[in-house]
Image (cartoon, coloured by chain):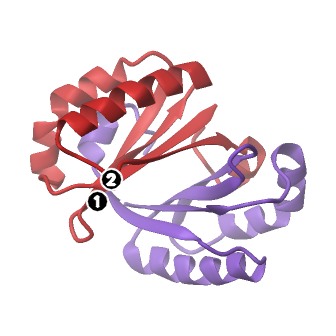
Chain colours: A purple, B red
Amino acid sequence: MLLLQIDFPYYGPTGEEMAEGFKDLAHSIAKEEGLIWKIWTENRETKEAGGIYVFENLPALEAYLDMHTKRVQSFGVTDIRSRIFDINEKLSAITKAPL
Amino acid sequence: MLLLQIDFPYYGPTGEEMAEGFKDLAHSIAKEEGLIWKIWTENRETKEAGGIYVFENLPALEAYLDMHTKRVQSFGVTDIRSRIFDINEKLSAITKAPL
């Protein structure tokens, strides 16, 4: 299992309004090959948003990251920061991670 | 629920060796006030590590972040990047997030 961490400057809607606006996108992301889950992150004060993803394998993660980066850029977003990590499953199990 | 994202340059052990070295710390973190869970992240190639945390509330998250930042610094780590986010629970539910 691999973790993908993405964040970027974000000036759009948050909360309920964001949930309504990105509902169809979320349903599409839920069907992505190799995706286990995504948590959607937002911060109205710092004007940042992003996502934390868990993927089954690296090829699926990299294909998604490439596609999603272009998609987010197409919304006019720049300065997208992404990081790919292995998950230390033993330590994460001790700290109650739902994996 | 709030998400805390932390990452930093990391030149220490990964995988099994990291799990063994940080086992006691993980048990201590598991007992932190307000912590729901932590995923431990590591990347041997980019020499980065960190954590993704979910907390019950902001005061607990901020108290942990302050304490943990000092602890990680005491290990000789600099350039610690941390971000606090709200979780968009509706969108995260669509993308199968275990919240």
Above or below, B65 against A72 in this view is above
Please give left or right for residue A7 compared with residue B41 in the image.
right
Please give left or right for residue A13 compared with residue B9 in the image.
right
Q: Position of residue B62 (x, y in %)?
A: 51, 26
- In the rendered structure, are the residues bearing label 2 and label 1 in contact, judged by CB atoms less than 8 Å apart? yes
- Position of the N terminus of chain B, as image quadrant, is top right
The label on residue B8 is: 2
Q: Position of residue B64 (x, y in %)?
A: 43, 25
User: Of helix, strand and loop, which one carries label 2?
Assistant: strand
Residue at the spot 41% in from the left edge and 37% down from the top edge: B38
Q: Which residue is mark 1?
A: B48
Q: Position of residue A25 (x, y in %)?
A: 78, 68
The answer to whether residue B16 of the structure is visible from this angle is yes
Say which label, 2 or 1, has the lower sequence index: 2
Above or below, A18 against A77 in this view is above
Q: Amino acid at mark 1?
A: Glu
The label on residue A58 is: none
Question: Crowdedness of circle 2 by 10 Å Cα count: few (<14), some, many (20+)?
Answer: some
User: Of helix, strand and loop, which one carries label 1?
Assistant: strand
Front in this rendered view, residue A72 or B93: A72
